[in-house]
Amino acid sequence: MIVLNGGSSSGKSGIARCLQAVLPDPWLAFGVDGLIQAMPASMRASDAGIEFGPDGGVLVGAEFRALEAAWIEGIAAMARAGARVIVDEVFLGGAASQQRWQKALGGLQVLWVGVRCESAVAAGREVARGDRVTGMAASQADAVHESVFYDVEVDTTHAEAMECARVIAALSGDGRRGCPLVPVPTHAPPRSGPRGPSSG
Amino acid sequence: MIVLNGGSSSGKSGIARCLQAVLPDPWLAFGVDGLIQAMPASMRASDAGIEFGPDGGVLVGAEFRALEAAWIEGIAAMARAGARVIVDEVFLGGAASQQRWQKALGGLQVLWVGVRCESAVAAGREVARGDRVTGMAASQADAVHESVFYDVEVDTTHAEAMECARVIAALSGDGRRGCPLVPVPTHAPPRSGPRGPSSG
Amino acid sequence: MIVLNGGSSSGKSGIARCLQAVLPDPWLAFGVDGLIQAMPASMRASDAGIEFGPDGGVLVGAEFRALEAAWIEGIAAMARAGARVIVDEVFLGGAASQQRWQKALGGLQVLWVGVRCESAVAAGREVARGDRVTGMAASQADAVHESVFYDVEVDTTHAEAMECARVIAALSGDGRRGCPLVPVPTHAPPRSGPRGPSSG
Amino acid sequence: MIVLNGGSSSGKSGIARCLQAVLPDPWLAFGVDGLIQAMPASMRASDAGIEFGPDGGVLVGAEFRALEAAWIEGIAAMARAGARVIVDEVFLGGAASQQRWQKALGGLQVLWVGVRCESAVAAGREVARGDRVTGMAASQADAVHESVFYDVEVDTTHAEAMECARVIAALSGDGRRGCPLVPVPTHAPPRSGPRGPSSG
């Protein structure tokens, strides 16, 4: 499994699609946007569900958390059933969000990927996309990485989605059957462009 | 769990959204369209993946089947983890498709729903939607129901999605905790509009 | 030109796509949804632009009106330049909205079509679509037809988009070159299903 | 008026949305994608209409050209009626395409903007978007600029949509009422990032 974590408009979905194109085997790609789409419309603006504030803040309620937990279990089960899965996530709770995934993914080989993008650049891309609540990009750019550990980090501020995907694919072990996942030091300075195994 | 099976443009997704609106608890809704979206773009027109013929026919390859099997396992795991789940499916293989789901859903309470729509009407709605391959509605209208059993059948030819959803919701047991699912005879003549428990 | 007027979720866009499919010549279809998409994002929730209230009400400001007036002039110019054009509109101002179009379309042959749908049915379809502000269908169902005159009215409550399109196409004069547009009496009781030339 | 010309996936639509955000007055944004959406579905894969080849090539027929000519007249009429309009175009015919617009826009103040993007980068973004025919980006990257003249050129290879929009907005005259449009020399070397008035 590959888990991409980054703020809104940091470029995760584009990287996921490029990964699907460059990885030799077929991978499924799921994301938290798909989970929100799967929820009842009434959950999208309620205290129990998810609320998008006018300033780009996101509030998540208890019922959202319960459905999300079941969704995470389901994604893990897909991987256990043999599917290669890319998840495109926004760890609103930082390390706590990662722990929820770690617990569900126990025993599976996971590549944790941090997708960075400078706040001002992500905010500009949010405007260019035209379909997102303004302010989400800026408010999430740093918060989602708090105390999260990664096998590799990429930075879309100056790198294309395709370049980032190639860096990640080289580490994913796909296409190199029998070759174990090479762990990458994770304490190198972030935001310095895509980093491969040798850059740590 | 609620599994809706019907041909393209028979109105399954609309019924799923209405179910989410009328059922008192929050339900997640997933569908085979979402699975196809989750696959690599290259799988959408390849022998190994899924192919949409110019006449509306759909061919599915071995790799598609493998990913689909894992996806079904994952949806089942979401339900086992406590989520209420509506699945919107197209049983291209008829009874064989249903058996794949039955095997994965073993032990879960499932309401099987047939969503019928007269072929000519579904074909007209396909044109009105404007985003589907022409011919899928007609070619699937009957084939997907072959030898499939249902707890209840609805027919969108003359009934609104909301009416169908109310019929299904009344049988779903949601909101009536402790009340067992009432099975509905399934051999009544199809295509006679939404049928409730008393109509069989 | 064909101008379709009806409330949100009354089925105008589906009828427009079916018209494009059944009319022998190629027709362009434009709608007020496209105009809103063409406006700056900031206009979509501002006093000067357009505002969608939580109850489904729609407020339109002065700058919206100015851009809309230019858009109407542009659509009229496309028709004068030889394009066959279907417009899918919501006359929030009833007769006053129609007069704005009439003034711009002076000299052009126009078929005015009222698209009716019972309020409760349109509200259910709004839920089934899942992408509209709840309440718009109900609040617009009758108001948009106030004091508006039509060459023909269709009612999607019990008729498919394709059936409605065939009724309209038969009156459009397309395919019957040289045959003048047959005006249809417009004071027959509304909401009685699609009405053709012989029903007036 | 502002006319943006560039190949598929060069970033025109994102620049258009950023322009709408940074320009002080409300501007309408239309594009050739919208025109294609407005055409009958049958025109999207026919000899008379528009055809997308498996290799990303685009063929346009006589009926497409006729509707396009009327559409161009309509956009010009919107501008003459007082609307500020951004057009996002793909000059498949190079200079000949520009001449069609020039003829229709006679008498209007137009800012011609070339949107460049290196072919390989645009091709990568095409994959990342996931909703385009593969190959269009590469096949159009250079061809659409052939013998076209511009007031300003921007290059999205290394510049964000928002940066490009700021360069264009500074030249658009909007917000500087009474100040004439400053023409920019157009024979400077292309593909060197966004160029402002002083860079020519």
Image: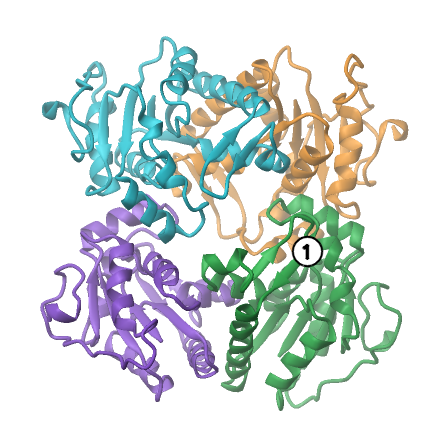
Chain colours: A purple, B green, C orange, D cyan
Question: Of helix, strand and loop, which one carries label 1?
Answer: loop
Q: Nearer the viewer, residue C141 or C5?
A: C5
Image quarter of the N terminus of chain B = bottom right
Could you tell me residue C179's position as x and y percent? 80, 14
Query: Can residue B174 be spotted in the picture?
Result: no
Single out the residue that lies furthest toward the top: D107
Q: Is residue C136 left or right of residue D29?
A: right
Which residue occupies the foreground of this view, D133 or B98?
Answer: D133
Q: Residue at x 16, y 29 (%)?
A: D195
- Residue annotated with mark 1: B57
- Do we see residue B73 in this rendering? yes
Q: Give the chain letter at badge 1.
A: B
Nearest to the observer: residue B70 or residue B188:
B70
- Residue C28 in percent (x, y) is at 59, 28
Tell which of B199 and A10 is nearer to you.
A10
The answer to whether A199 appears left or right of D164 in the picture is left
Looking at the image, which residue is at 62% across and 72% down? B23
Task: Pinpoint residue B84: horizontal percent, then vertical percent.
Answer: 56, 78
The image quadrant that residue C49 belongs to is top left
D1 vs B11, left or right, is left
- Find residue C124 and report its horizontal and vertical position in percent: 66, 56
- Relative to C104, is B35 above or below? below
State whether residue B78 is above or below residue D177.
Answer: below
Q: Quadrant of the C terminus of chain B?
A: bottom right
Amino acid on which disc 1 is placed = Gly
Seen at 43% across and 26% down, the residue is C67
